[in-house]
């Protein structure tokens, strides 16, 4: 183990560092570097690692193992003296999300006695899982309001080490199982949490906390939130959406929701009308088919869907006692209302399935699909020659 100083704790605002390489080794195509001191936070405590460069070479990963911090690079670094530069935007983002999480967890515990069981900080989203069976919109709003009040108060965020004999003197949020001293992050006078992550120095630097939604998760409630620059980016995005909708629908923002609702209602009405018209058209077509000649009717409707074919078959059977066979692509729809007609479901099973047809149905309506057009033709011939003729003879 090589003990190195963690400047991300002692000087969290330090973005550039001149230091020495104390060890370097090759692992596959990666170079693993240990520095005498570092500004790069390694993955841990729910917080992702920092990024940046060492001598201009971009960091791929930073991790800690047995007290040593390892910097992973795509190529070896020429040392021993190096310049490390921190990706400050990423660090600040992590500090804002992580500090905002402390605020939310503390408020949920203080106001509702819900404890935080886990925390996710990713590029995709931030969330905490709290021991709540359910969270109402009003509770979300209340917690969000309180968090933003604490941001406005610009409370100092302090970090210090606490030894076991001192634990009783501080209202700790929770005491971890592991032994020894704890690193405490205190939101001045309000929250005392053991934590190894990086945080802002005053709550004002969190900027803004926005709770996005909550959902049930493994008997708990998962609360999704955004802080700082992420919340601003989200506001920009949503304001952009809103502005575009206002322009698309030509209504003031205040009337947007009502307009969308009325448009949806109008669409439902139009769909209903269309359905009625289609039904009428099918009945009209059925009447024409029946007028044009006697059944059984063999129809080809390559452009129709199954539902339309079934509707047409029913419409024809409503007009006369007959049988209908409609082919659409590889699919065949069968129906009849003949008192002595064949049981169609059984017919499909016995005659179509041996030809590779897949389907089934009731005694008077069935459908079957053939992937091989030749087999479909064989099945149709079979229907014409034997089965349907027999049915008519009866
Ligand atoms: Zn923390």
Image: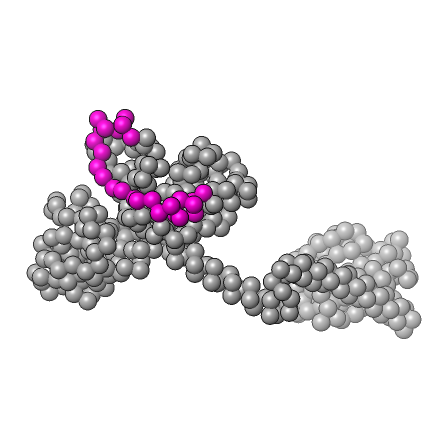
| Residue 114 screen position, x and y as percent | 44, 34
Q: In the image, is residue 162 part of the stretch drawn in magenta?
A: yes
- In the picture as drawn, the residue positioned furthest to the bottom comes out as 292
Query: Which quadrant holds the C terminus?
Result: bottom right
Task: Tell me the residue at 78%/55% (across/down).
Answer: 365
Residue 202 in view in this figure: yes
**x, y percent for residue 171:** 32, 30
In this rendering, the answer to whether 2 lies above or below 29 is: above
Please indicate, yes or no, whether residue 121 appears anywhere in the rendered image. no
Whether residue 326 sits left or right of residue 116 in the image: it is right
Quarter of the image holding residue 231? Answer: bottom left
In front: 379, or 304? 304
Q: Which residue is drawn at 38% across and 45% down?
A: 153
Q: Where does residue 1 sit, x and y in percent of width and height?
A: 12, 44
**Residue 312 placement: quadrant:** bottom right
Image side of residue 117 versus residue 393, left or right: left
The magenta-colored residue range is: 146-170
Q: Which of 145 and 129 is in front in this view?
A: 145
């Amino acid at each position: 183990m090589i003990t190195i100083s963690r400047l991300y704790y002692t000087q969290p605002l330090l973005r550039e560092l001149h230091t020495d390489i104390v060890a370097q080794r090759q692992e596959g195509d990666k170079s693993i570097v240990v520095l005498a001191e570092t500004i790069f936070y390694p993955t841990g405590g729910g917080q992702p690692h920092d990024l940046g460069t060492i001598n201009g070479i971009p960091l791929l990963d930073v991790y800690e193992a047995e007290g040593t911090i390892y910097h992973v690079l795509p190529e070896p670094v020429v040392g021993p003296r190096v310049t490390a530069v921190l990706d400050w935007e990423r660090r600040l983002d992590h500090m804002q999300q992580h500090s905002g999480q402390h605020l939310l967890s503390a408020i949920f515990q203080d106001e509702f006695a819900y404890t935080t069981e886990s925390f996710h900080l990713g590029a995709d989203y931030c969330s905490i899982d709290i021991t709540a069976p359910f969270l109402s919109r009003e509770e979300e709003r209340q917690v969000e309001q309180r968090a933003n009040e604490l941001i406005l108060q610009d409370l100092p965020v302090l970090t210090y080490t606490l030894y076991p004999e001192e634990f009783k003197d501080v209202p700790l949020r929770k005491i971890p199982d592991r032994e020894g001293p704890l690193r405490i992050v205190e939101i001045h006078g309000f929250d005392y949490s053991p934590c190894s992550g990086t945080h802002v120095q005053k709550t004002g630097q969190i900027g803004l906390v926005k709770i996005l939604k909550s959902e049930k998760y493994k008997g708990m409630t998962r609360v999704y939130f955004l802080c700082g620059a992420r919340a601003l980016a989200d506001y920009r995005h949503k304001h952009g959406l809103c502005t575009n909708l206002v322009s698309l629908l030509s209504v003031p923002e205040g009337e947007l929701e009502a307009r969308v609702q009325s448009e949806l209602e109008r669409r439902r009405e139009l769909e209903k009308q269309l359905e009625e018209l289609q039904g009428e058209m099918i009945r009209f077509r059925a009447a024409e088919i029946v007028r044009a000649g006697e059944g059984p009717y063999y129809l080809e409707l390559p452009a129709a869907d199954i539902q339309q074919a079934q509707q047409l078959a029913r419409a024809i059977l409503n007009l006369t006692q007959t049988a209908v066979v409609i082919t659409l692509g590889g699919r065949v729809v069968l129906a009849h209302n003949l008192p002595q007609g064949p049981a169609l479901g059984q017919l499909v099973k016995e005659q179509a399935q041996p030809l590779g047809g897949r389907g089934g149905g009731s005694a008077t309506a069935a459908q079957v699909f053939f992937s091989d057009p030749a087999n479909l033709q064989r099945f149709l011939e079979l229907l014409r020659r034997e089965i349907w003729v027999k049915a008519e003879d009866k």
